[in-house]
Amino acid sequence: MPRAKGGVLTRRRHKKVLKLTKGHRATRHKLYRRAHESLLHALHYAYCHRRERKGDMRRLWITRISAAAKAGGLSYSQFINGLSKANVEINRKALAEMAVSDPASFSKLLSLAQDKLKN
């Protein structure tokens, strides 16, 4: 029985890697071995940065809430503390969206937080 060689499958796998590394520089999209290394690094960076993005978005939301709260006369930490004392459970994403798109309702939350801090 003749030996089965994996030429077709190997070529298919190589073509797939070279197609995925299409935008990479120099030999990183032409030579299979370099392209495979480049692909592994790129996939690792994509995985890590998908998780990093969550922290980046949280920082952005906190910055927006802080700016809106300072305009109302409270610091971010005082505002969040006042909301927690008032038993208002709203996430930072919604608060940031409210601060940008609906300042009237955000100011109501701000006054509620101020009232709870005084008591």
Image: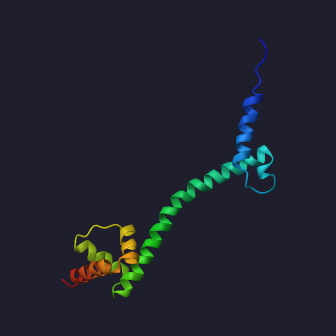
**Whole-percent x, y for residue 35 in the image:** 75, 48
Side (left or right) of 46 relative to 69: right
Q: Quadrant of residue 75?
A: bottom left
In depth, the one of 108 and 115 nearer the eye is 108
At horizontal 77% and vertical 24% (from top left) the residue drawn is 5
**Whole-percent x, y for residue 41 in the image:** 67, 52
Q: Quadrant of the C terminus?
A: bottom left
At horizontal 27% and vertical 74% (from top left) the residue drawn is 83
Side (left or right) of 114 relative to 98: left
Side (left or right) of 97 relative to 88: right
Is 19 drawn above or below residue 53 in the view shown?
A: above
Q: Residue furthest left?
A: 119
Is 118 drawn above or below residue 50 in the view shown?
A: below
Is 7 drawn above or below residue 82 in the view shown?
A: above
Q: How is the image coloured?
A: rainbow
**Whole-percent x, y for residue 33 in the image:** 77, 44
Side (left or right) of 85 relative to 31: left
Q: Quadrant of residue 99?
A: bottom left
In depth, the one of 96 and 63 nearer the eye is 96
Q: How many labels were placed on the picture?
A: 0
**Whole-percent x, y for residue 8 in the image:** 75, 29
Q: Residue furthest top?
A: 1
Q: Quadrant of the N terminus?
A: top right
Is 9 drawn above or below residue 106 in the view shown?
A: above
At horizontal 45% and vertical 77% (from top left) the residue drawn is 63
